[in-house]
Image (cartoon, rainbow, N blue to C red):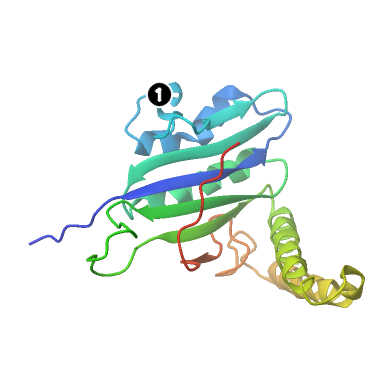
Amino acid sequence: MSSYHPPFEIHLHGQVALRPDVGLEQVQEALKPLWHYAGARSFSAGAVSAYEEEPGLKFDAREHLIQLCWTVRGHEDFRQSLDELCMNLNDVSAQGAAIEVTFYDAEFDEEEDDREGESRDDFVMLFVGPNPAAIMQVQRDLLVQDVINMMERHFDGSELGGVVAEIDKLFTHRFDELVNSLEVGRYPRGGSGGSGGASGHGGGRRPRHLH
């Protein structure tokens, strides 16, 4: 007897700078795991978000980048599509980029007093890029930004140079380990994988991002 698992509303947000030689056809193919999961037969049909106010999946020809602000209804199996998406984006990206993925529990209502159980909301940060160094660079930049924002509540920004230097040491060590590994093509677990990243509930629902 199979158990019923309620669906999620899954939201992706981010942007990926593209190599100069990448065009619309390659973008459509790179994003195919998303629009194919949505049940669409073409990019134009699948690029539309479940919410009208969201831009969806867009190729910005002027800025030469992919913009993601797209919601689809799905289940846990969507994570498999994310793995394929990351591999595709690695092949077309010009630099490292971060993509936020939020799983909203579609049947959980925080306003209901008689609700049972906890929300299954989840948040995942994905990192993609043309090579491990580019991926680690964007990870490093995001971590530094988060740490500085937190510590500036207690210290002046000019006092935090040593903290940033220590973060850089950690990433330098990780990169050196990767270079010296025989498995350069396989990123360390929980670190700089194109389809890896930080995951957590984060204490409450995260707001949607709109362009």
Which residue is located at x 39 percent, y 60 percent? 121
Query: Circle 1 sits in a helix, a strand or a loop, which is it?
Result: helix
State the image coordinates of residue 74 (x, y, percent, origin top left).
32, 46
Q: Nearer the viewer, residue 208 or 78?
A: 208
Q: Most extreme residue toward the right, as rendered?
A: 158
Q: From what the image shows, is residue 169 above or below residue 99?
A: below
In which quadrant will I find the N terminus? bottom left
Q: Nearer the viewer, residue 93 or 12?
A: 12
In which quadrant will I find the C terminus? top right
| Location of mark 1 (residue) | 45
Q: Residues within 10 Å of mark 1 (few under 14, many from 20)?
A: few
Amino acid residing under circle 1: Ala
Which residue is located at x 67 percent, y 23 percent? 61
For the image shown, how many numbered marks are present on the structure? Answer: 1
Quadrant hosting residue 171 = bottom right
Which residue is located at x 30 percent, y 57 percent? 108
State the image coordinates of residue 73 (x, y, percent, origin top left).
33, 43
State the image coordinates of residue 119 (x, y, percent, origin top left).
34, 64
State the image coordinates of residue 67 (x, y, percent, origin top left).
60, 35
Query: Left or right of 9: which side holds 180?
Result: right
